[in-house]
Amino acid sequence: MTSPLGLEPTLPIVQLGDPVLRQQAQEWTGQPSGEELAQLIQLMRSTMLHAPGVGLAAPQIGLPLRLAVLQDLWPISEDVASARERAPLEFLVAINPSYEATSERTATHYEGCLSMEGYTAAVTRPADILASWMDANGTQHTAELHGWQARIFQHETDHLSGTLYIDKAHTRSLATSQNYARLWSAPGPELAREALGF
């Protein structure tokens, strides 16, 4: 499949209910590698951006491998950036990623998922994490991530353990994308929390 602009090929995104989304993804141990790995990463990136999204894990294209791509450079308002601690995230390839909370601070915000089209729900997650991953060159990285960057990293890493955001969501917050846009797209979840009771 090719994007509407015809610039990059894309893949179909696996949807909720497919067993691959509930499997433990396999550790990357060297395969695929080289040009094959580079092509896979580029294909995942173009699929993510075309969707559009800020992250995509390999199981979402039907591949049970501990690999994810992340990027958040979409334009947003200052209000949203402040309320969600949303700073730009340059393109990141995360192989065999893991994370742990580094504080007791949490944040609750609405999340969506490219594998659960048409819905969104509020999820409470650690706001500060220590993230670990390997890049496409085999170099190991660790970094402290905060706010929205931490949320994206957790969301994509969870995919690799067969966990979807809905498993951690406040179920009373679940909304269609249309209702979210119409009613609950304020920078924070306070209005939705009061009205929906979560």
Image (spheres, rainbow, N blue to C red):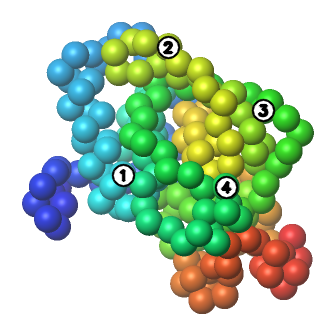
Q: Give the secondary structure at mark 3.
A: strand
Answer above or below: position of 85 versus 67: below
Q: Amino acid at mark 2?
A: Gln
Dot 4 or dot 1: first in sequence order is 1
Dot 1 or dot 3: first in sequence order is 1
What residue sits 54% from the left and 72% below the top?
A: 77
Q: Which residue is mark 2?
A: 140
The image position of residue 186, as x and y in percent, is 67, 78
Dot 2 or dot 1: first in sequence order is 1
Q: Which residue is mark 3?
A: 101
Badge 2 local density, few (<14 within 10 Å), some, or many (20+)?
some
Q: Amino acid at mark 4?
A: Glu
Q: Amino acid at mark 1?
A: Met
* Disc assigned to residue 85: 4
Dot 4 or dot 2: first in sequence order is 4
Badge 3 local density, few (<14 within 10 Å), some, or many (20+)?
some
Name the quadrant containing residue 189: bottom right
Quarter of the C terminus within the rendering: bottom right
